[in-house]
Image: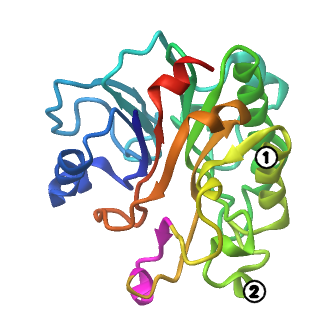
Amino acid sequence: MKIFSWNVNGIRAVIKKGDFGSFVEKYDPDIFCMQETKAEQGQAEIDLPHYEEYWNSAEKKGYSGTAIFTKPKPIAVLNDFAAEISDEYNLHNDSYGDPRAEGRVITAEYDHFFLVTTYVPNAKRDLSRLELRDKRWDPALLHHMKMLDAKKPVLVCGDMNVAHTEDDLANPKANKGEHGFTDEERQGFQNFLDAGFVDTFRLFTEGNGHYSWWSYMSKARERNAGWRIDYFLASERLKEAITRAEILNDVMGSDHCPVSVTLDDAKLANL
């Protein structure tokens, strides 16, 4: 089973460029998750009859949003966090609006695992949303992951808007303390690992130079001056079934590229 995640930074724009269709044709995902769709279902001209579509769009037009396209039909699909989690972590209005209305999470349940796709809020250049990330959003996401993991293994994918270690961005010294590389955001990600979830890419690849986002400025992608901020996290007990984890930096169309994991179906069924 091949599962992909891609922050498309506007699904309609990627379709118009032709990059969306070529991606699906080349990689033929069993499941692919998208973040920053910036659209509602039906606004994008997508003709993929072999896929079920699930969308969580922001109330604000042309902003944020997530989607899952899947060949295997899920048992159930949930948008956002459960109400009790949002209430416990006070995920209500901040100066930017209501994070619950930004279409940032979809959870799909399959026979052998849960799949969560998320577009984690950006802390903002002036760090004005760091408190939301540090004190509320990241803890709420971890609570959600642990609650699911108590029932069956979990895969979490998406734009996490943080480079975890110095190996995950090209210029760590220059960016220390900047949004996406603050101590608080990095610790928030570390908390996922400390809770028993694994960074799947690091099961197979060490070192730096492996990035999933590049600024549009200064030919950053050509120079590979990027950040790894798109991830697949997995329950520890899923490790046996994960045969590959990749960054597909040849896929164009967005300032992000897709990331993927491949699962061994037989091992997955025997977990």
The numbered disc on residue 173 is 2
Position of residue 237 relative to residue 245, above or below, is above
Count of residue discs: 2
Please tell me which residue is depicted at 17% across the width and 31% down the height of the picture: 48
Q: Position of residue 113 (x, y in %)?
A: 57, 22
Q: Nearer the viewer, residue 240 or 57?
A: 240
Q: Upstream in the sequence, badge 1 or badge 2?
A: 2
- Badge 1 density bin: few <14, some 14–19, many ≥20, Cα 10 Å: some
The answer to whether one can see residue 6 in this image is yes
Image quadrant where one finds the C terminus: top right
Q: CA distance from mark 1 to mark 2?
A: 23 Å
Locate residue 226, reporting x and y percent.
53, 76
* Amino acid found under the numbered disc labelled 2: Lys
Q: Is residue 107 visible?
A: no
Q: What residue lies at 21% left-to-right and 57% top-to-bottom?
A: 19
- The residue wearing badge 1 is 193
**117 vs 211, nearest the viewer:** 211
Q: Which residues are magenta?
A: 212-221
Residue 179 lies in the magenta stretch: no
